[in-house]
Amino acid sequence: MSSNICGNCANFKPRQGERFFNCTSAVQAGVKYGMQVRADTRACDAFVPIKASPAPQPPPKKTATPKKDRQRPLGLCPWGRLIIIVAIVIAILLLSFLGYTCAKNLTSPAPTPEPTAIPQTPTPIPTRPSTPTPVPTPVAVIYFELGQFSTNPVIRATVANPVQANSYRNYLGGTVDAPVGTVFVICDSTLLNEPFTLRIITPEYFSLVNALGLRYYPGAYAVTDALSRSEIRAGGAASGKILFVVPQSDWGLEVRAGNAPGQEAAWKLPW
């Protein structure tokens, strides 16, 4: 077989001055044909026998990663999360209990303020009726007319001009009202001393007795021209108003004073 065939690349040598090389001896799959190739190309590659494609290789088998080599997912397992949540709740409850205990121990009851004593200005205004005292049965009660002097040879007394009033004018010019449910009984009184002795007298020389035998004594009220504690010289006299506070329901009232040992002088009031 001639070596001067188109399939031999070494024969692609055109003549001088030619651009193409004519090949008329090409054979492909038993078919003859001619062709013209350029000298500056590698047209002879077309005549390189086609190599059979290599048999496909089976894909590489995947090697199973051992369980111990697998990377574990990040994070906690459900049991771990549950344990952490329970621990946080217990810690919060414990801190709350400790805080409440400390606050309770630190909190002490405020001291009860002691009442401040308010200075009381003495006032002659009566606040309640005089305390009645049961009258012991006298040896004798001698009655006199209002304005008539008793017969006591040592110190003689008389009562006149009795009035009932719900209020009175004091020596300062103010008005004093009787306590609720009571009434004032005001009388003029005069005492005469014997001509031989100096005596000290007080308003309590007189008393007021009701029909039940309850006795009231005059108080130290600021009624104008009140009979006050004083000395009566020998043969002298003292006079002034005496005031009693009695319940409005009292009746059968009479003023009494000492007349003699075992005797009382009495003046009945018109109520």
Image (cartoon, rainbow, N blue to C red):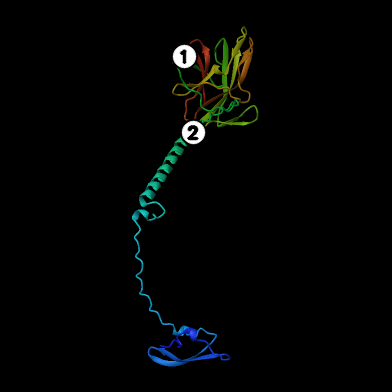
Q: Which residue is mark 1?
A: 140
Label for residue 106?
Answer: 2
Who's the residue at 38% across and 49% down the image? 80
**Residue 57's spot in the image, x, y percent?**
36, 71
Q: Which mark is residue 201?
A: none
Amino acid type assigned to the residue bearing label 1 in the image: Ala
Structural distance between the alpha carbons of marks 2 and 1: 77 Å
The local crowd at label 2, few if under 14, some if 14 to 19, many if 20 or more residues have their Cα within 10 Å, is few
Query: For the residues carrying marks 2 and 1, which lies nearer the camera in this image?
Result: 2
Labels 2 and 1 touching (C-beta < 8 A): no
Three-letter amino acid code of the residue under disc 2: Leu
Residue 148 appears in view:
no
Q: Give the image location of residue 2, x and y in percent.
A: 43, 88
The residue depicted at 55 percent of the width and 90 percent of the height is: 15
Residue 231: x percent and y percent? Answer: 63, 13
Along the viewing direction, whichever of 186 and 127 lies nearer the viewer: 127
Sequence-wise first label, 2 or 1: 2
Where 9 sits versus 191, above or below? Answer: below
> Can residue 200 be seen here?
yes
Q: Is residue 73 left or right of residue 160?
A: left
Q: Secondary structure at mark 2?
A: helix
Q: Residue at x 52, y 87 (%)?
A: 13
How crowded pointer 1 is (Cα within 10 Å; few <14, some 14-19, many 20+) is rated as few
Please report the residue visible at 47 percent of the width from the left and 35 percent of the height from the top.
102
